[in-house]
Image (cartoon, rainbow, N blue to C red):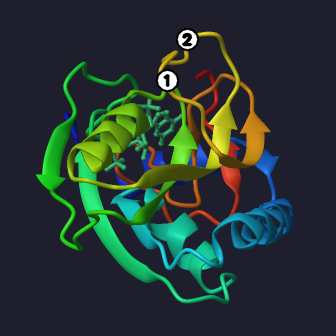
Amino acid sequence: MSQSLTREELQTVMAEADLLKSREEVEAALDRMAGEITAQLSDTMPVVYAIMNGGLVMAGQLLTRLNFPLEQGYLHATRYRGEFTGQTDLQWQAPPSIPMDGRTVLILDDIFDEGHTLAEVVKSCFAQGAKEVLTAVLVNKVHNRKNPDLAVDFVGCDVEDRYVFGYGMDYRSFWRNADGIYAVKGL
Ligand SMILES: O=P(O)(O)OC[C@H]1O[C@H](OP(=O)(O)OP(=O)(O)O)[C@H](O)[C@@H]1O
Ligand SMILES: Nc1nc2[nH]cnc2c(=O)[nH]1
């Protein structure tokens, strides 16, 4: 985070934000995604990786909806680092730890924006020997700046092209805990 924020400023951001998806809408999206993932992966004993930090909340809420044997781990890759626009380089802060050689891998993340983060993570999983790699995101941001190398397999909901926070997504490293998906006023 490049500058410090006061509690009052952070409360104002929340008070002025637009609610794009309520908790009820997110829960319905997670239920539907869990059904789709179960139909496709329940026989595969997959390794399911959450991308930290943003994927933490989505993964926690999705995983208990999956009622089949799987292994769960995390990796930390970041390119926004608390800012509103992403850097070109993806910084790996924690590599995956569960071996994926010959396995089906499912990657969970909060948001598919330009797609560079997921594209690089998927590439890295194949380089580590994964047999197949699938991706699931809670939010797809709709615009025409997507990385052409990536198609996400499971999507919770679409949002407009604004900076969003809540359900794991940050506003300058805060408000990942917000119980809805919000868009920042003016962004
Ligand atoms: O599709 P993209 O344009 O690549 O953006 C999506 C990525 O950006 C966010 O991560 P960030 O780099 O902010 O790290 P964080 O999860 O630690 O907040 C988010 O969690 C996704 O991983
Ligand atoms: N918090 C947050 N992180 C992102 N990473 C890529 N796009 C976004 C966004 O809209 N919000």
Q: In the image, residue 126 lies at what x, y percent?
A: 31, 45
Number of callouts:
2
Is residue 12 among the parts visible in the rendering? no
Which residue is the site of mark 2? 145
SS under mark 2: loop
Can you tell which quarter of the image residue 187 is in? top right
Asked if the residue under mark 2 is in contact with the one under mark 1, i.e. CB atoms within 8 Å, the reply is yes
Can you tell which quarter of the image residue 65 is in? bottom right
Drawn side of residue 10 relative to residue 36, left or right: left
Asked if disc 1 is less than 8 Å from ligand 1, the answer is yes
Drawn side of residue 133 relative to residue 12, left or right: left
Q: Which mark is residue 114?
A: 1
Query: Split into 4 quadrants, where in the image is the N terminus?
Result: top left
Which is more N-terminal, label 2 or label 1? Answer: 1
Q: Is residue 135 above or below residue 24?
A: above
- Amino acid type at mark 1: Glu
From the viewer's side, name the closer residue of 136 and 113: 136
| Neighbourhood count class around disc 2 (C-alpha, 10 Å): few under 14, some 14–19, many 20 upward | few
Can you tell which quarter of the image residue 100 is in? bottom left
| Neighbourhood count class around disc 1 (C-alpha, 10 Å): few under 14, some 14–19, many 20 upward | some
- Amino acid type at mark 2: Arg
Residue at the image point whose x is 42% and y is 39% from the top? 118
